[in-house]
Image (cartoon, rainbow, N blue to C red):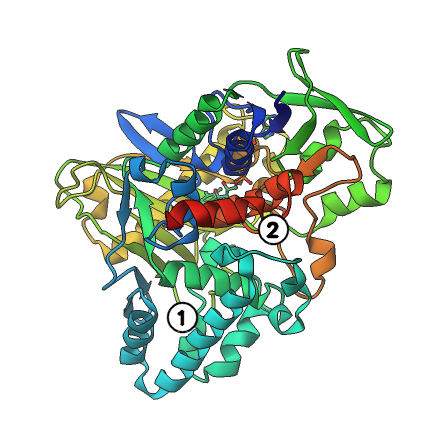
Amino acid sequence: MSKTCVIIGGGIGGLFTGAFLAKNGYEVTVLEKNAIIGGGLQCFRRHGKVFETGMHIAGGFIEGGSLNKICSYLGIMDRLKIQHVPAECMDELYYRRTGEVFRIASGREGFIDSLSEYFPEEKQGITAYVNELYRIKDEVKLFSLQEQSDDSFMNWEKLLVPADELIEKFISNEKLREILAYLNPLYSGVKGHTPAYIHALLNVLYINGASRFIGGAQQLAALLKEVIENNGGQVLAGCEAAYIDVTDRHLNFVEDTDGNRFTADCYVSAIHPAMMAKMVTTGTFRKSFIHRLNEIPLTSSAFSVYIDLKPDSFPYIDHTCYFMEDYGNMWNQEKHNSDKAPVSFMYMTPPDENQGRFASRLLIMCLMDFEEVRKWEHTETGKRGEEYEHWKNHFAQQAINLLSHRYPGLRSQIERVYAASPLTIRDFYNTKNGAIYGYRKDCRDMFYSRLPVYTKVDNLFLTGQNIILHGICGVPLTAIITAEEILGRNVLIRAINEAVSQ
Ligand SMILES: Cc1cc2nc3c(=O)[nH]c(=O)nc-3n(C[C@H](O)[C@H](O)[C@H](O)COP(=O)(O)OP(=O)(O)OC[C@H]3O[C@@H](n4cnc5c(N)ncnc54)[C@H](O)[C@@H]3O)c2cc1C
């Protein structure tokens, strides 16, 4: 008889963990509160155009990348519609005040050479810095899907230096120090706190090659659902877990908001741990543990502007762009200036099927502190009031004004504008303070900010971006560790490597 597993949360973490377990003999049931599954992979459609909510650029899908191997093992890689970002320019960084533009290439050599062209006197330092990023990456065996004996890399003190100090060690030019942290919006780093290994893994992931979903990231969620269903499981949308019944450190059942009970041999929580703890039978976890789940510092939230472009007007850009108002803001991008305008943001034109010269959509994403919306925290979607709507519209327009410096005709090329604030993110994913990457890893206190995948409840496990790594590549890697806690250490890593070597 097969074993059973109930997973709370149908985002990347829940779906990958479910697919791994389903492929290895478990009858899996995934409970997802939203009407559409996918969490960060979810897209919305307005006036016939599809917009991504929480997935814009992906690392790890290139040939030999860990996500490519994982999806090949699951039998879905060939069916994903993905566009790889051209190596000559994977990212463009623009400083408005100085008018400087930096075009950054991918590939280890390409990355070094493209930056050395702007800072020739730093070539040696850039090379040594990139070598160090790859050396750190090699220490994290999970990243390259190598078998692990334990997770001792976390104890290696050299990895626990802050990311900004790692850069400073190799680079003396102040501008270049800042530019080398330009991927900050993809991990929401904080100077002096974000560990060098997070910065290194993110950078290596994208230096190796970035990709984008053609027509939206929802397709990945649909394919993972198929893997679960083809192996006898089910993914239930519109099913919100409300209560987790535990006695004597053993989970008995999960109940949804309609009173339906789901029982299984084991359970995985793929939602924010603080939200999970609210649902568990009182007394299951110590007060100090619950306090910790609520107090671990969070990554920042974000404000997204979704622009529906007029036909044949705005050029399609095949890479990601980063807008910086000026130098000095790289490590505090969530702060905004006194006009309530962003100081920086990421923007891009997502690819369509049969993409031509012009883009149909433009997306702007600014990091944002939850404090910006704190005064409306007790409001609900659609009922947040006029003041909030005015603020939201003002902020979106400020971002468009800034981008118009780069593209003077932009305003006339816009058909419609939609926006999502940290409150939208909080309510949509049920994540604390709308933190886009979950808990913030802090090299000054790694043990406080990092949770294991097991809990004191013998059949309850944790997964998702809050646990080990975040993002499109990090969450599936975390899912491997969670699934292996159930299946056995290295079982999946071995199976994935065997599958791709055949
Ligand atoms: C605006 C934004 C932009 C981003 N851009 C990128 C990017 O370009 N590249 C990248 O790699 N990463 C990006 N990310 C991060 C990425 O989306 C996350 O790291 C990833 O989605 C986290 O996956 P997860 O499974 O841990 O959580 P989620 O994807 O949040 O999934 C959790 C799921 O659980 C569901 N849920 C919550 N509570 C319950 C409940 N009680 N019962 C049932 N279901 C429940 C939620 O509805 C959700 O579907 C972005 C995030 C945001 C918000």
Q: Residue at x 74, y 34 (%)?
A: 277
The N terminus, quarter of image = top right
x%, y% of residue 437? Answer: 54, 48
Examine the image and state in which quarter residue 319 appears.
Answer: bottom left
Quadrant assignment, res 351: top left
Q: Is residue 251 above or below residue 177?
A: above
- Farthest residue to the front: give it: 502
Q: Where 338 falls versus 257 (above or below)?
A: below
Mark 1 is on which residue type? Ile
SS for callout 2: loop
Q: Amino acid at mark 2?
A: Ile
Res. 206 mark: none
Give x and y (percent) for residue 29. 57, 22
Per the image, the residue denoted by label 1 is 179
301 left or right of 125?
right
Residue 158 position in % (x across, y down): 62, 74
Residue at image point 69% right, 60% down: 446
Distance between mark 2 and mark 1 Cα atoms:
26 Å
Q: Earlier in the sequence, mark 2 or mark 1?
A: 1
The residue shown at (52%, 21%) is: 233
User: Residue beneath label 2, please?
Assistant: 468
Q: Nearer the viewer, residue 145 or 60?
A: 145
- Residue 122 coordinates in the image, percent (x, y): 37, 85
Q: Is residue 54 left or right of residue 79?
A: right
Question: Is residue 315 depicted above or below 389 in this figure?
Answer: below
Secondary structure under tag 1 reads helix
Can you see residue 335?
Answer: no
